[in-house]
Image (cartoon, helix red, strand yellow):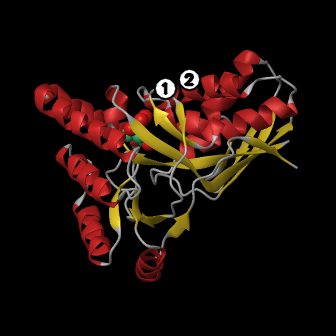
Amino acid sequence: MKASAPGKVILFGEHAVVYGRHAVVTAINLRCYAEAKKSNKIRIESPIATTGLDFEKHPYVSHAVKRFMEVKPVGGVQIKIDSQIPVSSGLGSSAAVTVSVLKAMDAEFNAGLSDDEIFELARKVELDVQGIGSGTDPFVSTHGGAWLIPERKRLNLPDIKILIVNSGESSVTAEMVARVAELRGEMEEVVEKIFDVIDAVAMKSLSMESFSKLFSVNQCMLKAIGVSTKNIDEIIQQLEELGVAAKITGAGGGGSVIGVGSYSALQRVKNIFGGVIVEPEGEGVRIED
Ligand code: MEV
């Protein structure tokens, strides 16, 4: 059986959300596809490698298979992954691969898991691999749509298009979350205040038609906690000069920059920098025919 799950962008609130602040996040119309077939051994095939259960090359898929087998013991499975979501880019590819694998296995082995149970397993996988995390990525990938976190309240976003530009540097969530934790350990009073500003920005976005000014403030705060890079700062400055407000999305340290602005400005930037223009996606994990 084949399943798919969407990637996501965090519009506001990454990192602060790990410490209980608000985030505004939406699924996007880029999906990861996972196929699961009964087998007598475990085989995982992806654009990265073909392996057995391999916690280094395929950490999320391997932990997902392991967690699924705790719920429903099976002799083996062949998994095939095909994703539209660039990896290590802050677009939720890890959660989408986890959720789509769990859904495909659920369907292939008739485990009867609800989407909430799939999310709970995906949440465990996130912690298995990263040790820390807010659960936002697997939640949004499972359910689709736009959400206010931590309440998990569905949001109706204004009609937006989002430009995604790859910084060319990879983003490793676990590393960046650990780096922010270290900074917070050194200067808790300061970092907590920065998180409060990020929280205020996320809440303000709920009543604003345009996200442009808030993107810029959120980005300044992300820079302040050390998750931007020189390269990303330069990209963002160039985008701003072309009329597109931009920020990191996800863990940072590399990964993707997201931009908002008029459609013509987004197109102009896309022609110069490459990238992809996406939209919020309403549908979460699903079975593919
Ligand atoms: C990663 O996409 C977002 C972070 O806030 C981590 C998390 O929420 O788990 C950096």
275 above or below 179?
Answer: below
Q: Is residue 269 rendered to the left or right of residue 147?
A: left
Q: Local crowd at mark 1 within 10 Å, few (<14), some, or many (≥20)? A: some
Q: Residue at x 19, y 29 (%)?
A: 192
**Mark 1 Cβ inside 8 Å of ligand 1:** no
Q: Is residue 273 rendered to the left or right of residue 103?
A: left
Tag count: 2
Q: Residue at x 46, y 77 (%)?
A: 270
Q: Residue at x 70, y 17 (%)?
A: 70
Q: Which label sits on residue 127?
A: 1
Q: Is residue 183 visible?
A: yes
Q: Secondary structure at mark 2?
A: helix
- Considering depth in this image, is 184 or 247 the residue closer to the camera? 247
Q: Is residue 32 rendered to the left or right of residue 86?
A: right
- Residue 65 image position (x, y, % from top left): 69, 30
Q: Residue at x 70, y 40 (%)?
A: 285
- Residue 18 image position (x, y, % from top left): 36, 30
Q: What residue type is disc 2 on? A: Lys
Q: Which label sits on residue 124?
A: 2
194 above or below 10?
Answer: above
Do residues under tags 1 and 2 come within 8 Å of each other at their CB atoms? Answer: yes
Q: Local crowd at mark 2 within 10 Å, few (<14), some, or many (≥20)? A: some
**Mark 2 Cβ inside 8 Å of ligand 1:** no
Q: What residue type is disc 1 on? A: Leu
Disc 1 and disc 2: Cα gap in Å?
5 Å
Q: Which label sits on residue 197?
A: none
166 above or below 220?
Answer: below
- Residue 91 image position (x, y, % from top left): 50, 51
- Residue 39 image position (x, y, % from top left): 86, 35
The N terminus appears in which quarter of the rendering?
top right
Image quarter for ligand 1 equals top left
Q: Secondary structure at mark 1?
A: helix
